[in-house]
Structures are given as structure tokens and as C-alpha cells.
Image: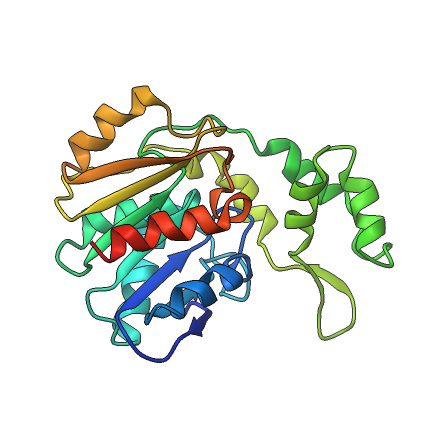
Amino acid sequence: MKLFFRQTGETGPAIVILHGLFGSSDNWLTTSKTIAASGYRVFLVDQRNHGQSPRADDQDYQSMAADLHEFLTDHGIDKPILVGHSMGGKTVMQYGMAYPGTFEKLVVVDIAPKFYPIHHAEIIRGLKAINLLGIKGRNEADAVLQAYEPILAVRQFLLKNLYRNEQGVFDWRINIPVIERELHGIGEELTNPGIVTAPTLFIRGSESPYITNEDIPEIKRIFPNAQVQTIQGAGHWVQAEKPVEFVDVLMNFINS
């Protein structure tokens, strides 16, 4: 699994960032430039079945952690700081359990190591309702998707996955059939949980339900050197909704 990536910054310690479900490395480009300006090499990785990375039949965290390990090995990235949002955060946590000693610190953005019920099924139905051969542009796709997802910002995020392929026909950069089949697994608790003693930061949005106060004892059981910081006024998309505050919290932890 040779993952597609983008790099910002040429020198300094390495930071590797993983996006969430339906996302891609594009989502983090602006943030990566701010981080790189502080003297870091930032690698933005497309996870399997997302963005420009290869497609595969599996979408589980053990496979995604193995993909990350292969990526770090292939590119000679030693002891990076690993950052993951949502699904990417679970990948980072799984990696921390499976490959101790190969990273410096972990940063998990708005996700806990627990089971989450399926709650993206309506989005999948909306994406499948878009007739790729019949639409002329994103506006027509958005009109279809609106019946399934009322929030404009979410629809705009989802439709970033729409592109014209080499034949000039609209296609998806996400593997919708596999993601649909594996939705339950994407929400599952992490497998083979072990204790991760490396410094770990959990960043949550005050308006997001993904990490509750009740989750913190279990987080600190698995990650005994973890701290949890809350960014006020942010929802699940903490880094996009409060970018300045997010980078401040992130860099304070990285530089500590």
C-alpha cells in the first residue's frame, strides 16, 4: 500500500497528519503551511480508499496502521509526531499500540478509543444518489446531496471528493462501496488495545459530542501520559473551525 502524500517544509522534525473519513490530505494544506513555518517537515497522507491513495478491499484500523508504518519506513521518517483527526485519530491510536518506540508523540483530534454507532449512512445514500454520468458540475451534485445532508459546509467538504477522471467523466476520490460496507468497523473500538506510554494530546471541540468527560478516564487508562485540551466554540472539525487556536494548542504540546 503506497500511500499518496504531500509535503510542506524541507527541514526539521517530521510531523505526519492523517485526515478523517471522507477526507484527504487537501483538508490540511493550510494548517500544514502554518506548522511548517515553525521549522517542521509536515507530511499529509491520504489514507487507503481516500484521495489519491490506492483502493483496497479493507478499511480497518489494523490495516490503516500497517499502511502508516509502511509509509514511514519507505520514506525513512524516524520518530515522527503523529497527528490524526477522527478516523485518522483512531489510526494513530492503533499505530501507537502496534508500533511502540517508532514515534515521538501522538496527537488525536476529536475522537476517543471507543465504539461509535453508525451515523454516516445517510451521507453514503446521498453520495450514491448522485448520477455521475448525468451531472454537469458540483452545483447539480450539491442539489441532490442537499436532500440527505442539510449543512452546506459538510456538503462542500464531501464534494471535494468529486473530480473529472482522465476520460473527462465525474468520479469519486473515495471508494464508496468499501466505505459503505466497512462503516461499522470504522466506528468500532480499537483492536488489541495496549498501553501507550508516549506523550499524547487529545484535542476536542467544546461543541463536539465525540469526546465527553466520561471518556477521559478510559483515555488516560490506555494513554497514561495523555492530556485532553478543549478548544472553545469548535465542533468536530476543530482545525477548520478554530485554526489559530488549534495550531497554538498543537505547537505548545509539540514544543513542550
Which image quarter is the N terminus in?
bottom left
Left or right, 245 with respect to 138, comes to left
Please identify the residue farthest to the bottom as the structure is shown.
Answer: 10
Residue at x 47%, y 61% (from the top left corner): 46
Quarter residue 82 falls in? bottom left
Q: Position of residue 59 (x, y in %)?
A: 43, 48
- Residue 83 visible here: yes
Q: Is residue 72 above or below residue 111?
A: below
Quarter residue 44 falls in? bottom left
Q: Is residue 72 above or below residue 251?
A: below
Q: Position of residue 110 (x, y in %)?
A: 41, 38
Residue at x 54%, y 66% (from the top left corner): 52
Residue at x 49%, y 50% (from the top left corner): 243
- Residue 25 visible here: no
Q: Is residue 74 above or below residue 225?
A: below
Residue at x 85%, y 50% (from the top left corner): 140
Q: Who is closer to the viewer here, 128 or 207?
A: 207
Q: Position of residue 79 (x, y in %)?
A: 19, 65
Quarter residue 173 falls in? bottom right
Q: Who is closer to the viewer here, 14 or 192?
A: 14
Q: Is residue 11 above or below residue 85?
A: below
Which image quarter is the C terminus in?
bottom left
